[in-house]
Image (cartoon, rainbow, N blue to C red):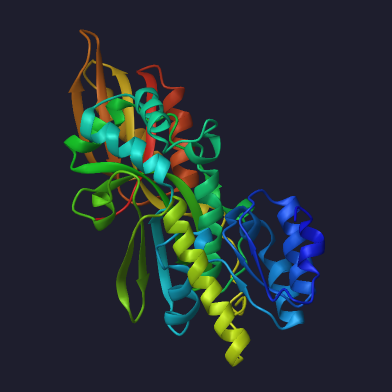
Amino acid sequence: TDDARSLIKRDDVDLVVEVIGGIDYPRELVLSALRSGKSVVTANKALVAAHSAELAEAADQAGVDLYFEAAVAAAIPVVGPLRRSLAGDQVQSVAGIVNGTTNFILDAMDSTGASYDDMLAEATRLGYAEADPTADVEGYDAASKAAILASLAFHTRVTADDVHCEGITNITAHDIQAAKAAGYTIKLLAICDRLKDEAGHESIAARVHPTLVPRNHPLANVHKSFNAVFVEAEAAGRLMFYGNGAGGNPTASAVLGDIVGAGRNKVFGGRAPGESTYANLPIANFGDIPTRFHIDMTVVDIIGVLAELTKIFAAHGISLRTVRQEEGTEKNARLLVMTHEAKESDLAATVETLKDTPSVIKVNSVIRMVGE
C-alpha cells in the first residue's frame, strides 16, 4: 500500500517503523500511530530533536513505546545506555563525533594536507556526502543529535534550537597543519556539558563546532567516517561508544534492535523508558560557556606587536597559554595563540578589538579546544 495513514490505523498493526526522513509528514504519521495505540520505532533525528515533548506525551498517554536508537550514531548503542544504564548516575559531559561525512573530510585533510573543497569532492565521489551536503557540513545534522544526547544525559528537554551550531566549511589546510604542529587534530564535535556557576546553580550547554582535540585523546583516533561518543559520568567515569554511525546496515541494526525491544514489551508486557525531564535544567547563555581557544592571526612584523596584543587579551580577562610565530612575508608574521579557559563572550569581544587594531592584518580563524 502507499496509504500510510490508513495502514497506521489498522487493528492488525501493533508497531510502526518510520524511516522516511523530514519532519512535518513523519510527525503527523508518528503522532497518529502513537495516539492509535501503536508503538513507534524511528531513525529520524530531526523529528525527535524538534518534537520530543509532543511525541513523548503522546506515547505516555497511549501507554506505548517510542524508540529512536538509530537517530543518533546508527548502530552505536548510546541512546539505550543513556536511557537505562546511566539513568541512576550523574552525567557530566557528552562529546561526540556524530557525523560521518564531516569526520571523513577532516580526517582526510589531516592525513593528506588537501583542501576542504578537494576532500568534500572526494567524499561525494565515494558516497559519504550527499549531493547537497549542507546539513552535514554546516553542522545541522550533528546539532539534532546533540539535542537528543543532551536531553537524555541531563534529564532536560533540549531541542535543536537550543544547540549552538557551526560547521566545517571555513576550516583550511593551514588550520589542520597548525593543529597538527601543536599536537592536535580538528574534529567536528557535538559537546553537551553540565555547568555550575559560582553560586552552585546548574545549567546545561549544547554546541556543535570544529574543535582542536589532543592527538592522544580517544576521539582524535576516530578515523574516516566512523563515529564515537565520549561520556563522562560521576560514578561510571569515562566511557566511549565507537563504531559505524551511518549507512544502511548500521542503521538497520539499530532499527531492528528497537523492533525486537518493542516486540518483547508487546508480548511480555512492560514499557520502554519514557522521556525523563525531572531535572529541568536551564539552557546556559552561550556567552557564559567557558572554553579554550586557538586564534590564528596575521600581524605586522614589527617590535612591540606581541606586547600590544597581549595587553588586548588581558584587558578582556583572557590569559594566554602559548604563543607561536610562523614565518610570513618580509613585513608580516602569523601568530598562533592558545588561551586558557575563557568565556565565549569575552573571546568574542577580544576578537572584535583585534580586528580594529592596525597591527592586526587579519584574524584568520578562531577554533575552540578540548582536553588538557
x, y (%) of residue 8?
Answer: 76, 66
Q: Nearer the viewer, residue 235 or 70?
A: 70
Q: How many marks?
A: 0
Going 38% across and 33% down the picture, which residue do you hit? 126
Can the viewer see residue 153? no
- With 164 as the anchor, is 309 left or right in this view? left
Q: Is residue 132 above or below residue 142?
A: above
Find residue 235 and report its image quarter: bottom left
**Res 220 visible:** yes
Considering only vertical position in the picture, is 289 above or below 201?
Answer: above
| Along the viewing direction, whichever of 257 and 163 lies nearer the viewer | 257
- Residue 23 horizontal side relative to residue 111, left or right: right
Foreground pick, 364 / 59? 59
Horizontal side of residue 83 vs 6, given as left or right: left
Q: Quadrant of the N terminus?
A: bottom right
Q: Residue furthest front?
A: 1
> Residue 279 in the image: x percent, y percent?
58, 77
Looking at the image, is 15 positioned above or below residue 283?
below
Q: Quadrant of the C terminus?
A: bottom left
Give the camera-side residue of 245 and 303: 245
Residue 60: percent from left, percent from top: 71, 80
Name which residue lies at 43% across and 55% down: 249
Side (left or right) of 149 relative to 47:
left
**Residue 323, percent across and down?**
22, 35
Q: Residue at x 24, y 57 (%)?
A: 218
Q: Quadrant of residue 359?
A: top left
